[in-house]
Amino acid sequence: MSLLRAHSVHEFGDLVFAGLRTAVGAEVAVTVGPELPGGAAVDVLIAGRPTPTQLAACPGLRAVIVPWAGISAATLDCVAERPGVALHNLHHNAGPTAEHALTLLLAAAKNVVASDRRMRAHDWKDRGRAQTAVFLAGERAVVVGMGAIGTRIAALCRGLGMDVVGVARAVAPNEERDGVPVVAVDRLRDVLTGARALLVAVPLTGATRGLIGASELALLGDAAVVVNIARGPVIDERALYEGLRDGRLHGAGLDVWYRYPQPDEERTAPSEFPFEDLANVVMTPHRAGSTDATERLRMNALAEILTAFARGEAPPNRVDPQRGY
């Protein structure tokens, strides 16, 4: 068995990579740095946004591993031009992101942020009478996207006593995933009708952009809560804002957005609409996967893929560049 040579252009820290090297043992040689090793002796390149120049410099390249979940269109195009190179991503963020989705769901349903702001001003006027919290147990939750993250979100919602239905692209007849019934995306409108919670956890592709529009939001039950930890444009921006502004929706918990700061910017409005002016919105800056365990989880996931390559096994999390996930 030959030694697998892996190189990461990302420097996650000496302690983190020390843990990776320990996990893969003598089967994998891991190098780190923005420059490729001499002679471009790389079997697996760990790069979030690999360039054509980097790929061309690695004639023996077997795979690219994106060290997070989301994959840019540029990366998909770049790797698609090298059909002999496999593309993988990491699902290490599934647990933290699912927990964050549940946090957003509860915070929006229970009006936590607005209540916190009032209490900081010593205002006791509303103790749940004017701004009533939503009771979730027994209500339907629709989880759009039943991959690593969505499946965990569904389990957490079941733990709240909710009636959970998952929506996925490819579904077998009467399919269940971890006890949750899953329907195909062509039945999305059916399961949204009357639902109290909508949680979105799909990758952004041509098929999912604008998947949730005004007509889909209008199907939700009274005082529904929307949570998006996927990508902003999966939900129509105007429709979501207006549904929240007009009180058609009880609230929303949003971790992903429609505008992001450029590298030299520190402050950027996350949307063309003033979501920040709405008291029924809980906003976080695309940080669902960031916890005190994130780097350890990332290195464990990297080690799993690299070890599988080294042993001639099928590595997990293979991405289809044509589909985008």
Image (tube, rainbow, N blue to C red):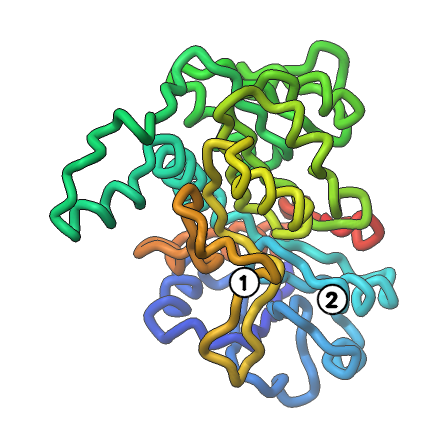
| Dot 2 alpha-carbon crowd within 10 angstroms: few under 14, some 14 to 19, many 20 or more | many
Q: Hey, what amino acid is under mark 2?
A: Thr
Which residue lies at the image location 37% right of the left edge and 68% below the top edge? Answer: 18
Residue at numbered disc 1? 270
Q: Hey, what amino acid is under mark 1?
A: Pro
> Where is residue 65 drawn, in percent x and y?
63, 61
Which residue lies at the image location 50% right of the left edge and 53% below the top edge? Answer: 275
Numbered label tally: 2
Label pair 1/2, CB-CB below 8 angstroms: no
When the figure is inspected, residue 306 is found, relative to residue 234, above or below; the finding is: below
Q: Nearer the viewer, residue 68 or 313?
A: 68
For the residues labelled 1 and 2, the Cα–Cα distance comes to: 24 Å
> Where is residue 95 drawn, in percent x and y?
43, 41
Mark 2 lies on a secondary structure that is helix
Q: Which mark is residue 75?
A: 2
Single out the mark in the foreground, 1 or 2. 1
Which residue lies at the image location 84% right of the left edge and 62% below the top edge? Answer: 80
Which quadrant would the N terminus be assigned to in this image? bottom right
- Residue 282 visible in the displayed image: yes
When the figure is inspected, residue 164 is found, relative to residue 312, above or below; the finding is: above
Mark 1 or mark 2, earlier in chain = 2
| Dot 1 alpha-carbon crowd within 10 angstroms: few under 14, some 14 to 19, many 20 or more | some
Mark 1 lies on a secondary structure that is loop
Q: Which mark is residue 171?
A: none
Give the image quarter of residue 172.
Answer: top right
- Residue 24 visible in the displayed image: no
Q: Nearer the viewer, residue 231 or 194?
A: 194
Which residue lies at the image location 75% right of the left edge and 47% below the top edge? Answer: 209
Q: Nearer the viewer, residue 108 or 122?
A: 122
